[in-house]
Structures are given as C-alpha cells and as structure tokens.
Image (cartoon, coloured by chain):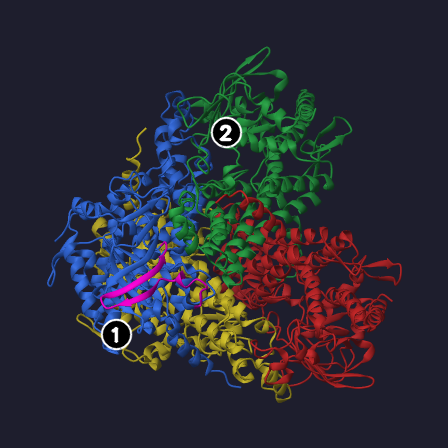
Chain colours: A red, B green, C yellow, D blue
Amino acid sequence: MPRSAADYINSVRDGRVVYYRGGKRVDDITTHPIISIAVKHAADLFDVKDRLYDDPNYGRISRYFKVPRNTNDLLERYKLIYEDTLRFDGLFNIVQAIGSDALFSLMIVARKVDRKYGTNYYDRVMKYYEYVVKNDLAIAVAQTDVKGNRAKRPHEQEDRDMYLRVVEVRDDGIVVNGAKIHTTQGGPVANEIIVLPYRAMVEGDKDYAVAFAVPANTKGLKFIVRPVLEYDGNPNAVNAASRFEVESLTIFDHVFVPWDRVFMFGGEWDLAGQLAWTFATYHRFTAISYRAATANLYLGAALYAARANGIENAPHVRDWLVQMIMYKEIMRMGAMAAALEPWIDEGIAVPNPPVYTNVSKLYANAHFIDVVHGLIDIAGGLIATMPSHDDYINPEERQYISKYLRGAVDGDTRYKIMSLVRELGASHLMGYLLTAMIHAEGSEAASKIGMLREYNYKEAEELINKVLSKIKL
Amino acid sequence: MPRSAADYINSVRDGRVVYYRGGKRVDDITTHPIISIAVKHAADLFDVKDRLYDDPNYGRISRYFKVPRNTNDLLERYKLIYEDTLRFDGLFNIVQAIGSDALFSLMIVARKVDRKYGTNYYDRVMKYYEYVVKNDLAIAVAQTDVKGNRAKRPHEQEDRDMYLRVVEVRDDGIVVNGAKIHTTQGGPVANEIIVLPYRAMVEGDKDYAVAFAVPANTKGLKFIVRPVLEYDGNPNAVNAASRFEVESLTIFDHVFVPWDRVFMFGGEWDLAGQLAWTFATYHRFTAISYRAATANLYLGAALYAARANGIENAPHVRDWLVQMIMYKEIMRMGAMAAALEPWIDEGIAVPNPPVYTNVSKLYANAHFIDVVHGLIDIAGGLIATMPSHDDYINPEERQYISKYLRGAVDGDTRYKIMSLVRELGASHLMGYLLTAMIHAEGSEAASKIGMLREYNYKEAEELINKVLSKIKL
Amino acid sequence: MPRSAADYINSVRDGRVVYYRGGKRVDDITTHPIISIAVKHAADLFDVKDRLYDDPNYGRISRYFKVPRNTNDLLERYKLIYEDTLRFDGLFNIVQAIGSDALFSLMIVARKVDRKYGTNYYDRVMKYYEYVVKNDLAIAVAQTDVKGNRAKRPHEQEDRDMYLRVVEVRDDGIVVNGAKIHTTQGGPVANEIIVLPYRAMVEGDKDYAVAFAVPANTKGLKFIVRPVLEYDGNPNAVNAASRFEVESLTIFDHVFVPWDRVFMFGGEWDLAGQLAWTFATYHRFTAISYRAATANLYLGAALYAARANGIENAPHVRDWLVQMIMYKEIMRMGAMAAALEPWIDEGIAVPNPPVYTNVSKLYANAHFIDVVHGLIDIAGGLIATMPSHDDYINPEERQYISKYLRGAVDGDTRYKIMSLVRELGASHLMGYLLTAMIHAEGSEAASKIGMLREYNYKEAEELINKVLSKIKL
Amino acid sequence: MPRSAADYINSVRDGRVVYYRGGKRVDDITTHPIISIAVKHAADLFDVKDRLYDDPNYGRISRYFKVPRNTNDLLERYKLIYEDTLRFDGLFNIVQAIGSDALFSLMIVARKVDRKYGTNYYDRVMKYYEYVVKNDLAIAVAQTDVKGNRAKRPHEQEDRDMYLRVVEVRDDGIVVNGAKIHTTQGGPVANEIIVLPYRAMVEGDKDYAVAFAVPANTKGLKFIVRPVLEYDGNPNAVNAASRFEVESLTIFDHVFVPWDRVFMFGGEWDLAGQLAWTFATYHRFTAISYRAATANLYLGAALYAARANGIENAPHVRDWLVQMIMYKEIMRMGAMAAALEPWIDEGIAVPNPPVYTNVSKLYANAHFIDVVHGLIDIAGGLIATMPSHDDYINPEERQYISKYLRGAVDGDTRYKIMSLVRELGASHLMGYLLTAMIHAEGSEAASKIGMLREYNYKEAEELINKVLSKIKL
C-alpha cells in the first residue's frame, strides 16, 4: 500500500542502532537534530504528486519500482530521477531509486544463477520485490566493502573480515560478518538494506560471494553516520540546512539472514561479478540522471553570481557557463542514448552499459571539478572571506555589510546569492559533493574499466582492415 | 531519376572553370590526376546499395533529401551519414548531405519570409528542391565569405566585395560579385552551388543578404582548389591516395542569377541570420554524424598501433583509448539526443539546436587534438622518422627495414600499420583534418555562441530562486 | 627592537574593534577562542631562530624587511618565505611578508611621484619604514576595494564609497571612508594596516588614488572577521586546529590619517596603477613562494594516502603525483627565474614582473584544482563518509572503526592519515584554500593581464620577420 | 682547429652510405637536392660569430664542448642553444650540442666504471673528446634501439638484434650488429656517431651494454633517411625550404669498432642505465633550451595571424597567447632553475635531473599540442583550404587571391603570414614537430619516470609527520 511521508517517518522509528558523532546512540532518528533532516528529506519523496502508477501485477506502486522493459521505460526513469532531484532542491534523494537499481539487477542475475545451478533465487527475489513494492519501502544498498589492503583479494586479507562474508551456515539461514562503507546512501534512514557483492570473485572468495536483504533494525546491524558538517556547526548553511542524505560505515556484527532473504551465496561466486556490474550499470544511469539535475544548482548559481557582480557578459564568464552547460547536457545526452540503445537481458532493459552510461558517468566524475572552478572564478574571493550569517543579522554590522556588499544588485540580494555560492563553492558541502562526484557510483578508474571491458571495437577494426588492405608492399 | 556513379561523372564534365596549383586551368576534372580522385570519391555515393527510398511526392529519390519530420527521420539521417562515412573509409563524403542541410533551412526560412513580406520564395525553393531530387544532384554550399577585416560589418569593409553581394538588379535576375571560401566542401566537383549568407545582417548590409543557387559551370564562377598535399607529392599516402574532398576559394566574378534561383534578397536582411543559423544547426548535426565515423579511423589505428608495439594493456594506452571512445561516443550521444528532442519548425524537424548539437559539436572541435595526441603517444617517434614507402619497396633496404621494424608483430605488418598511423598522426592529412575539426561547420567560438544564444536557463533559475527563498535575513 | 612572540601578543591587546560571528565585539583577540589561534600563529613568527639580520642602516631587524637589491636578495627572500611556510605546517603566515611587499613598492613609486610632482613622499615612506622595522611590527595590507558594480569606475559608482576615498582634507591630515575586503590577510591581528589603491585610476577617480598607513586600533576602523569554519564547529580539524590566518571585511568609517602617514593622494592618480601593480608583483612573488610550500602538504598527504591504501605504484596514482610535483616545482622554478632576471627599479630589485612571476602565479591559480582532484582520487570516497573524530574516541565505536579502517597500514594510522586528507580534500578548509588559490594575490584574469601588459614580443617578432622574408611572391 | 662551414661541408663528402626515398644510394649528400639542405643547415653553425672560446687545456674550441662545472656554465649553455636556435630560424640545429651531451655523460660514467672495475675508459673518453674538440666535429648520437616487442628485455627478443649488440670480440676491437632509430638527430650529416645504450640492463643483457663512437663512413654503417616531406614535394614550404635536420634508421651491419673507441662494454652492464640516464638529463636540458626558442615561431606566428585577421584583442586570442607564453617561459624557467641547482657529479655540473629538467621537459611534451591548437584557432580554416603558392604566382589567379585574402592587412601580406602559419599549423612539418615534441629526448612516460625515480619526498614527508603528530586518538 502506498505510504505517506508520515507513514514512512513512523516506520523508521524502529529501534535501529545508529551512532552520530560518538558518545551516545541516537535514540530516535526522526527527532535527532541532524538525522531527522535526512529523514524529512527522504520522507518528502512519499508526498510527491503523481509518484505512483498502476502496475498490472502489483497494483498502484511507486514509479521507481517499475521494471524497465524498453527505451521508453528507461527514458521515463531518467526523467523521474532528474525531476525529483530538481524537486528536492538539486540534492539527490535516491531512497527508492537505488533499491530498484539493486532489485532489477538481482532479477536478471538470479535467473542466470538458477538456470546454471538449479537454484530458486529468482522466486526469492520476486517475493522480496513484491514485499518491497506493496509496502512502498525505502531501501539502501550496501555494496562497497572496507577492502583493507587493495592489493589483495578478499580471502587473502590478513583480517578476513575486510570484505563482508558468511561466517556460519545454519538450517534457517546464514550469519554474516563485516562492514560496508560509504555507498550505503541513506542507509541509516532506510527500511531495508540490500547487500550486494562489491566485485568479481574467484573460487577462494566464495564465502564473500553473497547477496541478501535485511531490515534496518536487524540485530547486529549498526550504522556509524558520517558527520554532516555541511549543516552541523555551520551557521551559513543554505540548501544544506534542509536537504541532505546521510551515509554510514555500516557494521554487520554477526547478522543473521533467513534463507528467503538470501539472493546469492557461495557456490555461485562466478556470477558475483556480473551482479556487481549490472547493479553498477543501473546505478550509474541513476547517477547521471540526478547529477544532471544537481548541475543546475551550479549553473544557476554561477549565472546569478555573474549577474550580481555585473560580469555576465565577460568572455571568461561565458566560457565557464559553456563548461557548465556541457557538464549538465553531456549527462543528459548519455542518459538518452543509453535508453535509446538498451541491452535487453532476461527481458529487462539495461541502460547501454559499455558505452553511453559509462562515457557520461566518466565525464561527470572528471569534470565536476571544472564546474566548481568556474563557480569560484566567477564569484570572486568574497566567498572565502565574507562575513558570516551571524554577522549579517547583527544590526551593528549589518549596516556596513549590506552597504558594502552591493554589486550590480543591492547588498541584501548579493549577500543571499553569495551565501549560496559560498555553500556550493567554498564550504564543507563542496568538499563532500566533489568527493562524491569523483567517487560515488564508481570512481574514474571504475568507469574506465567498465567502458573498456565490453567496448565493441569491431566497427573500428573492420575499418582499419579495409584501409590497410590498400597498402601494397 | 536516380543516377549511377557513371552518370554523375559524365555530368561534371561541363566546362566549369577550375584551377589547381596554378599555371593552367583544369580541362577535365574527371581525368585530372588529383581532382579525378575527389570526383571518384563523390561518385561512389551514387553506387551505394539501398541509398534510395520511395517518397510519396517525388518518387524514388536519395535518402539524403528526405525532409525530416520527427525523431525517427533525424535518427535515420544520423545513421545514414555515419554509415556512409564508414563505407567511404572514414573520410567524409557529404556531396548530398550538405545540399540537403541547405535545402531544409531554405524551406523553413522561406516560409517565414513569405509570411512576413508576402514574397514567394517558398515556391521557388520547392521547385528547386524538386529539380535537385529528381535529377539526383551533387550539391555544394558556399557560405563562408572571405570577410576581410573581421572587426567590420560587410558594408563597412574598405573593399566592398569582402562579403559576396548583389551588384546589379535586372529584370530577369541579379548579378552578384565576391568570393566564398573553404566551407564550399566539394564545390569543384558538385553539380550545383547553393549560396547562403554567412551571418546576421543589419539594414546597411542588405545587398549582402542574399541566397541563391547556380550550376557549377555558370559564367563567372571560378574554383581555385586547395593543394591536396596529403596525396599530391606524398609517396606515403594510404587512405588519402583514394579518398578526399576538395575545397576551393570560389570566385563569383559578376555572376548572373535568374529570379527563380534567388531564395532571399535584400529586403529580408532581418532573416539572414536565421537562415545562416538554421543551416548551421543542420550542418553541425551532419558534422557530428560524420566525425563520429572518422573517429573510428583514429580509435582503430591507435588500437592496432598499440597491439603492434605490444603495449595495448599499458595504463597510458588504455587512458588514451578511453579518450578516443569518449570522442566518438559523445558525438553519437549528441546526435541521438538532438534527434530525440527536435524543434519542429514550419513542420520540419530541426535537430535540437541550442543544446545537444552544439554541445557535441563543441566537444568535437575542442578534443580532436587529444585524439591526435593519443595516437602519436601510442605510436612512438617512429611515425616521424621511419623510412618512406619508396625505401620499403627497394629490395636493398627492405631487408633491413622489414627486419628492424618488427614489434609484437612482424615487420611488414607493423610497417603497414605505422604507415597508416603516420598518415593520421604526423602528416599533411593530419594538419588538414585537425584544422577541419577545429573550424569546419563553425569554430569553437561559433559553437559557444550557438549554445549560449538560445540556451534555456529557466530550469536552473527556478531552482536557484527556490533555494534562495530559504535564506532569511 | 626585535620582539618576542609574547611582545607581539601584548601589542595587539590594544582596544581594536573586531567582530566575529555577530552579536558582540571581540573584547580581547588574544584570548578569543578562535581569533587567539590566528594571533598565536602570527606570534610564532617572532620566535623563529635566525629570523634577524644585521642591517647596515637599521641594525638587527627582521629579514623580511631587507630591501632586495639583486638576484641573491630575491633568492633569499623566496627561500625565507618558503621555509617559514613549511615551518608553520604548510599554512601561510605572511604578517611581515605582505607588509614588506607594500613597503618596497611604496619606496619605488614614492620616488617617481616625488620626481614628477616635487612631493616628499619618499621621506615619509622611509620614516615609516624605519618605524616599522625598528619596532618589528606585524603588518596587514588592505588593497581590494568592495568594488560595487564591476562595470563602473570608482567615481561612477552609484554609492561613491564602493572604493575607499578621501572625504575630507584637513590641515593635519585626511579623512577616508570606505571598506576593503578579503586581501587584508591577517588584518585583525596586525599592528599596522597599509592601504594601497586597488587599480589604475583616471583623473575623475583622484579622490580614490590614496595610499597610507594606520594602526589597527585607529578610531573608525572595524574588522568583520570571516567565520573560521575550518576549525570553528569542526570536530575533525587537524592542521586547522592550530594554524590559520584570518581575513576581514575592513571598514574605514571616517578614519583620520595624519599627513606623515599619507603616501599618495589625489594629484598623483596617474601613478596609482603603477603602485598597485608593483605591489602585486612583489606579492605574487610572495605567493608563489608560500604556495610552493603549501603544495608539500598536498603532495605529502597524497603520498601517505596512497601508501595507506596500498596503491602507491598504481599508474593513475603516479600520474597524480607527477601533477603535484609539477605544481610545486613550477612555482619554485618561477621564483628562481624571477630572481635570476629581476628588474632594477629605483635601485630596488623587483622579481621579473611580466614573465616568470606571472607565469608561475597563473599556473598556481589554474592548477591547484588538479592537485585537489588528485588527492581525492587517491584517497577514495572514505574522506566524505568516514566517521567523525568524536566517533573514533568513543570506545564502543572505536573497536569497529579501528578494525575496519585498516588498509595497507593499521586502522589507527590510516584514520590519522585520512583525517588529514579529509581536511585537505573534502572540508571547509579545502573550499577556503581552493578559493584562495584561485583568487588571492590576483585572479587568473589578473595574472593574464599582468603577463600580457608588459610581455616583450620583440624576439618572436624579429624571428617571424626573418622567416617571412624568405617568401617570394 | 676550428672549422668553417666550407670545411665542414668538405668533411662529409666521405663515401658514407646514405639512402633517401629508395632506389639508389645518395652519391654526395652535399649536392643531393634534399639532404644538401640539412648539410647547409648544419654548416651554418660553423660560421656563427663568437662561437668559440679559449679553453685552458684545448685552446680555441667550440663553446658547445665546454665542460660545465657550475651554475654559470649551465646558464651559458642554455643561452647558447636558445640563441643559436633563434639564429637558425627557430628550427633546431644540435649537431654539436647532442655530441657534447653524450661526451659529458661519458666522462662522468667512465670514471665510475673505472673506479669500480679498474678499467681505463675515462682516458679513452678524454682522448676521443680531445680529438672531437680539436677537429671541431659534427656529432650525432644513436641511442634509441628499434626495440622489437616492448614487453621483452633485449636478450629475450625473438630476433636478438632488436637492440644493438656486440656479436664478436676481437683482439683489436669489437663487432656490433643492430639498428638505431629516430634519435640519431643529424646522423646522416655528422662526422661521427656516438652510440649509447638505450636503457638499464640486467646481467643477461650484457652483450647489449655497449657505448662507442665511429666515423659516419665506417664500413657496414648505413643511413636510411626519413622522407623530408615538409619540403620534398611541398610547393608551399616556407621555413622548411631552407632549414631542417634529417633523422635516419641507422643500420650497423657488422660494424667493427677499435678498442680505443669503445667506452663501455659488457661487464659494466650495471652502469648502462646510469649512462643512458645521465645523457638523457643533459639532452633534455638541451631540449628545453631549443624548444623554448622554437616556441617563438609559434608565438610570433600566432601574433601575426591575429593581427592579420584583426582579432588580436579578442579574448580567446589573448588566452591562446597566454598559453603560448607559458609554453615558452616554463621551459626557460626550467632551464634556469636546473642551472641554479645543479648536481655536481665527478666534478661536472649536471642540470638538476629529477626536478626542473624533467618538469619542464614534461610540460614541453604535453603542451605543444595546445600551442598548435591555439595557432590553428587563431588562423582560421583558411590554412587548410587556401590556394597553393603555385596559384598565387599565376597572374590569372593572383588578382583574385590577392584581392580576396586581404584582412586587417593587405592580401599579399596576409598570404605570406598565412603561408607560414599553414606550414606551422596544418602541414607535414607540424606533424613532424608535434611528434618530435611528444617523443624526442624521451616521451611523456619517460619524463614521468625520470621525475619520480629520483624525486626527493623528504620535505613533504617531514611536514606530514609533523602535522599528523597533532592528531590524538
């Protein structure tokens, strides 16, 4: 049954173990001064108008969970994520997007595993999917292991828990131990956590080849939330005062998972890589869709800053605007092209994996820094040295600040614009976003590997063969 | 009636005035040792299988002339140009593409002019279009004026002929004088030349606001062809030995144009800019379509060079391949997105002008140099210092060259690959292509202007307004 | 008389008007929880061993105030600033450097003004210089005006105070009104403020062509300090917990300046630009000297992060290290070359203005962002999502964090390294430094203007003339 | 005894075996239509005024052979190379520079070998040095082997001759077999060829660890010269019509070398790497010195093209000029800094190897392409499509070309400028230079390896250790 924001908020008041900035556990995430904002941000998704559709099998459910079958479904998914991100002030809110990314990949790979190994994972996945969509749940995905020494495989690590693994197999399920880090977007505020393998495995790694789902309040599960310094302790937060997601170091301290929630385990290690990679493809498609929306924050802020400074026609400003437009639009082009030429795998449409998704994702990783560079260059050093909001509202200082901050617009207006620009260009939030843009949903190196692994050189090779045949020795 | 390659070749033996490397006119372009190759290249287009379709109004005509009405028509047009470029060994062959780019823009703008000024240009355009498609003609477009002092408008130039202009109005037509340069792709080997204004005009420029078409053998028309040094005098030409287009400085020495071939003139100077710009949009769409195909030459050559050197898994080589894939695919993404979100203008589909076409065109202008950089880096200094083809086939030297040029493959194979790489990376052809990639179909500056002129900031502005409203002073 | 750190600290407890984060004035900057750290940072300069030298005219004084006469003096000055910045943990401490930059430029320009206008500024400057060096003062420079609408000159602004100006001329001195922003490095903790014109002036601007010095506790002078969020409210500050400079919006509310402290005024508007520009040259030389030292923080942090992650030999890591080395060394090369080919002006050595100082300054502006990019890429997403220091020291969480943060080194070591990297790569401090690196001591645009204004093309022009003469038409 | 140009020319008419473009050997390189130009270019060096100095040991000899002992010697060497390159129209002429680079490295390493192995190489080197300087010889260096499969060491190659090696040891000397490629700058026109090992060797490679010198007309030595297509067959050559060096594939077909010309062999394989690397350091110093001069050609051509087009104040043109200035000046800065902080090795000054030489060399490799990009962007597409020189001098065409090529200057002047720009930006010469700038004197990868191998991280490490010690867990 579709839920309201209030329903969702009630549902996460469930005894889960959450830590924030040490010392004591968070009793109730819905009232905690920091984490409640992330809860509210997630909750807003449930009050979006027109967020549901009528599914022939499952009734009225969230559009995020619509299994894509063709170009049109993928185009709609791109627009859904893009528009919702705009709706939520340009900051991502993927508490159903990421879960559906995981579910679609589990559907595809479970069928392959079942076919190869005679297992019944597909039924489990579909049963779990039904549970999720009918209860309209918020879902986080825990994929990235802490990884220890990056030069070693999971089973070669000195401490065997550097990748999450099965430590006990019981009649009624499995017990897992380990920790997942930073990709658990929204983990502490989700209803359910889906766990996926991080990478391709070899046979020795089979205890690590595991996929499953657990509720957020499962015994042994602990969330150590990142410090949200873009808001916490920052008197000058603007957008970050009401919008953010929280990531966590997520501890699985001997967590039990019943069999019907286990979607891959052990013997199927040879398909772990494909599961990791299919999820990555869906999730990169999600990434380019929401990042294109976030790019509007930067493009718009740069435009307003240029106008406030009276320099919007300066050649270097125009050049930066061009860079920002390219940043935004290359992601949108990539999403469209990925939808236009999908791979159909097990009857489900995967946004073109080796090319368009990765090309635009890589562009997004590598060039966000140019967007930041441009914004700072346009804004001026003011964003590093201007007075605090505390000063502005102090009448004794305000007279001076308001007078002296005027530009091509009055002082109050310019201060507001520059406050936002300071947040986007010279604050903790920028550091967080820049790191996220470089690493989230796969680093630059990961995007390159993704691109080269499956790139089809045939067209180029045939052309070269044809041309080389012209040479007579 | 559709023509064969032979029909086309016969048709350009028509007494046109062509100069090549001075001294004497070219008597017959179809037998001239250099220009005949460009003729043959163009001719090949007429022998392509499946190049025709059944048009409801005009019968069986070339697919290049199909007026695009929707996304699908534009997607087909992109693929047609892309695939034909691959077919012609990666080097562009746009002798019908560019003409149709011009015809579509004339159709759109002629209707606007007629509506505003009560003229009958649209009928003239359609009559000319019928003539072109029924006779299956090869067409060049002359748009770029020689421009003189770039700081001055057409009518402000010291020598009034720096932009082509009408010097006499007669009962039966107009007389024009001036010269057009380097965008007249294929001019000397086309059947017809369509002339378009280069830029937006002001009232004082009205003698310059002129569009028309003339046959290539019109009296007063003279083509001074560029020296084709990628082949002429180059013992090491590979692809360039059989494939190239020729550009010219095209002189209009008091050329008469009858009224039915005049498509814009004088009074309508205020729409000259729109005509120039609509053509530019179509032609940039053509550009990203053929350039994506050309990119395969570089991607493939880099791959083969890496293999021949035994370094295809070296990290810097992989990074260059990623750059080359991005170069190719961002253009394809742009073409797809431009087709997916066209502007419908006067019932005709224009590939999304302000965004996708210009974004990918600008990427194409700015980053071809990285493709060249990568190819050279992968190939090694060999391509600058290796022996000539003349040496290779001299038995006395061949024994040494063949022995010492072996890499991870035998010497003959590596020599062939490196010959192609030399042509693509360290030869006159590279200089020509690099200049073309930077300037053809509009320079980087032109692409930026195109992008910013019509970019819709509304989405970004609304977002910023919403966020700024959170700030309370 | 040379001062100790304690002497300096006592000297700034002088009743100056300082605001920090609104509400109430700072009573004593030496005890204020935030600003006292900046005071302590500045104070440390006075306890540096060997910081003095024996000047033939002024006795034992700070080496910062040694007037450079030749290459060797400039090389020593570069090394002094570089080594002191390393000494102060990589964060700049220019409380005597910037003052001497201003004093040297005043010496040079005052002589020119006196020669042209028969004034006696040079004597005033030298008297003030004697006062400064003998009392071993800490000095800030206020140059950047708030500027209002950047499209207008000082005297054209709607509010005439957008550039600091003389509002009254009295027998005993002048009264100035206006505000200076963000370049007043260390302003709130200095003994003296030297005010310089921001730009070249025209005659109409003559009330704005003013240079002078005042003590920090002068009546009417008010410092609105920037919020030091890299430490204030940040539980994870590392280097920023003990090292920072504070900038301010500095208000001159009808401040009186006696004649002997006025170094340029009004009639000499035509030399205001030269004063601004000479100071900029010295200050950019200071900038490349300290930035090269700061670069070590990033280079070292990247190296340690790579080792902690076990990836220091990965090709992309090596590429980033190369970029960071280039960043550091191009600045050092620039400083050396600027010293090696100085301009001698009025007997004083100016570090080569149009070329080496600006070239390396521009490189420093434009490429710091690559340094940040590299650091983030090497570190991983961990720096955005890892637990807070508060969490780490909570025993309940520490067991998990320490266990799961191990890499190629143990968890505690990696946490320490990643804490520093988080500060340098994904925090408010990074936003501050990035903005500073782009804008401080002149933006990229300013560096370009500086470079082109005086660049000597003669060598290139002669070469081209010689080559062109080979062409016979 | 110092030689004149005529002396030099006579000396190379010596029966050497040279091939050019196949078919037949070159009888006399001093009269051959192509190679004689390279001879003339080299000869010009011998007629330079003030090219000699008085050496205390060797009398009046070429300044190129002055063994550098300190900063000043290195600064003078940089200026000598820079100024001679300007003198020779911006195109390098290193027929004594490269030989002295090799001789200095042989002096340094021979001493180390002698000390370690009790050999007497140093005496042989000095005797050979005396022979060279007293006879004022032109010298080429052959270092780069053909290398076969790059994944294998010399002794692992399928064909053992992929690196030059000793195939026979006789009482009176050694016999070598193999081939050297493309770094043999000026090989075919030199008096002597010095052969150096290409890389560090392992014990299995000891037959390959060989250094020696032979006269150019030695039996078994054969030069297969690169095709000089920047002039040969190019009607539009400007600078290339009178200035170029020739490289060759240099065959050593069982060449005998007497013992007194052998400078390293076999047992000393462990010092082969040091010899290769010391030469590389000297030669990269030579490279940045001559490339900085060549950069003037591009800077000047861009400036003239901008003026001819009337766009020298356009913002994008100014940006390109800034890039070109940076290209030129970062090399000069690097040369100065490398001289200012040399390494003194065996009493000889080596230009700072790990840092300044490699940093500026890497910048030179990586950014020449930006210089080319800028020149093309400023010039316009004209350089790809403009008429040939043949056309210009044909009176029938000239009237049109001259008229229509006018810009902000008259048509003849603009044609001349654009002819040079065509050569530098869109011709075979550009392909040759671009490849050379990327690969000559070591590729980008080689420069990076050179930089990282000896880079001293100590300063950065100490800083990080100091900062990390602030963190208390």
Residue at the image position 67 percent from the left and 46 percent from the top:
B336
Q: Same chain, marks 1 and 2?
A: no
Please, what secondary structure does the residue beneath circle 2 have?
helix
Question: Residue D452: x and y, percent?
Answer: 40, 69
Q: Please identify the quarter of the rendering in which residue C294 is found.
A: bottom left
Count of all numbered marks drawn on residues in the image: 2
Q: Say if residue A453 shows up in the picture.
A: yes
Q: State the SS at label 1.
A: helix
Return the chain for callout 1: D
The boundaries of the magenta stretch are D156-182
Whether residue C174 is visible here, answered yes or no, is: no
> Image quadrant for the C terminus of chain B?
bottom right
Q: Which mark is residue B35?
A: 2
Residue closer to the observer: A434 or A430:
A434
Tag of residue D325:
none
Q: What residue type is labelled 2?
A: Ile
Q: Are marks 1 and 2 in contact (CB under 8 Å)?
A: no
Chain containing mark 2: B
In screen coordinates, is D412 left or right of A67? left
Q: Mark 1 points at which residue?
A: D112
Compared to D236, does A33 lie above or below?
below
Q: Residues within 10 Å of mark 1 (few under 14, many from 20)?
A: some
The answer to if D166 sits in the magenta stretch is yes
- Picture coordinates of residue A150, whole percent (x, y): 57, 76
Looking at numbered disc 1 in the image, what kind of residue is underneath it? Answer: Lys
- Which residue occupies the foreground of this view, B9 or A300? B9
Q: Is residue A349 above or below residue D9?
A: below
| Residue located 62% across and 45% down the image | B355
Dot 2: few (<14), some (14–19), or many (≥20) neighbours within 10 Å?
A: many
**Where residue A148 sits in the image (x, y, percent)?**
59, 79
